[in-house]
Image (cartoon, rainbow, N blue to C red):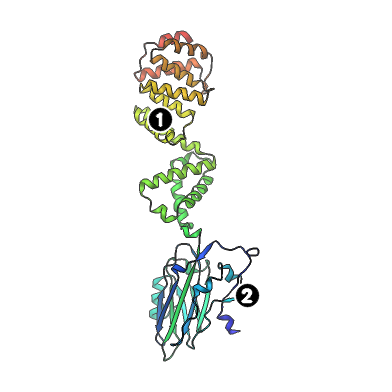
Amino acid sequence: MNKLLYFVSAVLFSSSIYAQKDGFWDKERATTKEITLSAGKRALIKTEDLPVGTTEFVYRITILDESQKLTSSLVSVLKAIPDPTGISQGTAGAIHLTSAISGDDKCTFALFQEANAANLFLKEGKTDRACWEQKEKVSKDAKLISSSSLCLTNLPNLWFGFESQNWVMNQKIVLEVVPWVDYKASRGWDKTTKNEILTLAKKLPVVSKLTKKEAFYAAFIENSSKKYTYREFSQLLAIEKNNAIEKLTEESLKETGEVKAYYDIIREKSNVAFQKGNYEEAISILSTEMFAKNRATYIDYRLLGDYYLYSRQFTKAEEMYTKGIKLNPSEIHFQLNLAHVYLFTDRISEAKAIHKKYAHESLSNSKTWIAQTKSDFTTFEKHGLPTDDFKKILRVIE
C-alpha cells in the first residue's frame, strides 16, 4: 500500500473517451539536476525557467546510493504519455513515473515560487510559504502539478528545497522537472495581458461612436491574440504598433458590423482640415486613408471631389464626381457638383443643361436642388471662387 504513495500512474487512453490537451511536453526546457546533500542539511535547486504557456509540470525526485544511476529519464517516460490527462485520468496499463530504483536514504522537500520564501527555507527550514510540501520522508517521488496550484503563479520561477533526513552520510538527489506547454497559453495571452489589450481598445477614438462596444472589445482581443504572441505585440516599434492597431481595429469593426464608424472618423478628420482651409491636408487624409487602402465609397468620391473643387483642381474634381456617379447613379448631388465644375471651367451650356434637368428635384440631404445651389454659391463666394456666372445659373432655376 505504501508503495502506491510513491507512484504516480499514467495511461495511454482513447481520444474517443477523453479529450487530449493541445500542447507538448517541453523536453528542451526540462530540468535535470543532481546534488550531493550533507547529512541533516538543506539545499535549494532552481529549475530551468518554466516557459510561457506552462500550465502543468511533472517532477520526479530520486535519492540514489553512491553506485546507483537512473535507468531512464523522466523525459523518456513521458514520451508514452500524450498529455497530462493521461496522468490525471490513470487507469489500467499504468506507466510508473517514479524511478525503478532508489537508495535507502530519505529526505523531505518543498516547492517555492518565490525566492524569498525559498531562501527562508534554506536558512531556517520554514515551509509555511511553500506552494507544495512533501512532509513524509521519501526515497523517491513523482507528481503532476496542475494549473490550479500556487506553484504556477510566478512563472518562470520555481525552486525545490530539500532537507536530508540522514544522521551521518551524504545523499545523492536527482531532480527532474518537465513542463507541459499549452499551445494557446504559450502565446502569452492570459488574463493580465488581455486586460492590457482591453485598456488599449477602450482608449481608441472610435469607441465613443460604437453601439456594440463589448462585442468590439471581444473581437479586438481575439484578433490581437490570434495575430501576435504577447511578446511579439509588446516588442513592436511605435510606428509598427500604430499600424497594427489600425488594422486590428478595422478588422474587429468589420466583424461587429460597425466599421462605418471608423471610416466616419477619418472623414471627420479630413473635414476638420478642410474647414480650416488646409485643402491639401484634407486631400492627403482621404487619399491615404480611404482610397489607397481600398476603403472608399461613393461618399468619399464626393468629399474628395469637393476638396479638389475648392482648391481649384477642377479636372480632378470632375474625375471624382464622374466616378461617384458610376458608383451611385441615384445620388444626384454628384450631378450638382458636376454642374459646378462646368460652371468654373467655362462650360456654361453644359452646366445649364444639368440645372434644367434637375431643378425640381430634391437631394439626399432633403434640400431642394434650388436651395442647395444657392447655398453652394454662397459658400463658393466665401472661399474666393469666381462668382461671375452665378446669375446665369440662377436665372435658369428660379
Q: Residues within 10 Å of mark 2 (few under 14, many from 20)?
A: few
Q: How far is the residue under mark 2 from the one under mark 1?
A: 73 Å
Q: Secondary structure at mark 2?
A: loop
Identify whether 233 is placed above or below 268: below
Tell me where residue 395 appears, x and y as whole percent: 45, 8
Q: Residues within 10 Å of mark 1 (few under 14, many from 20)?
A: many
In the rendered image, which quarter is residue 120 located in? bottom left
Q: Is residue 219 left or right of residue 284?
A: right
**Amino acid type indicated by mark 1:** Asn
Identify whether 154 is placed above or below 293: below
Tell me where residue 361 appears, x and y as whole percent: 54, 16
In the rendered image, which quarter is residue 85 located in? bottom right
User: In front: 354, or 206?
Assistant: 354
Tell me, yes or no, if residue 384 can be seen here: yes
The residue wearing badge 2 is 93
Q: Secondary structure at mark 1?
A: helix
Residue name at image x 38 percent, y 20 percent: 314
Quarter of the image with the N terminus in it: bottom right
User: In front: 376, or 57?
Assistant: 57
Residue name at image x 60 percent, y 75 percent: 94
Which mark lies nearer to you, 2 or 1?
A: 2
Q: Is residue 241 left or right of residue 145?
A: left
User: In front: 31, or 123?
Assistant: 31
The residue wearing badge 1 is 271
The count of marks equals 2
**Amino acid type indicated by mark 2:** Gly
Residue name at image x 49 percent, y 47 percent: 220
Tell me where residue 341 appears, x and y as whole percent: 41, 18
> Which one is earlier in the sequence, the residue at label 2 or at label 1?
2
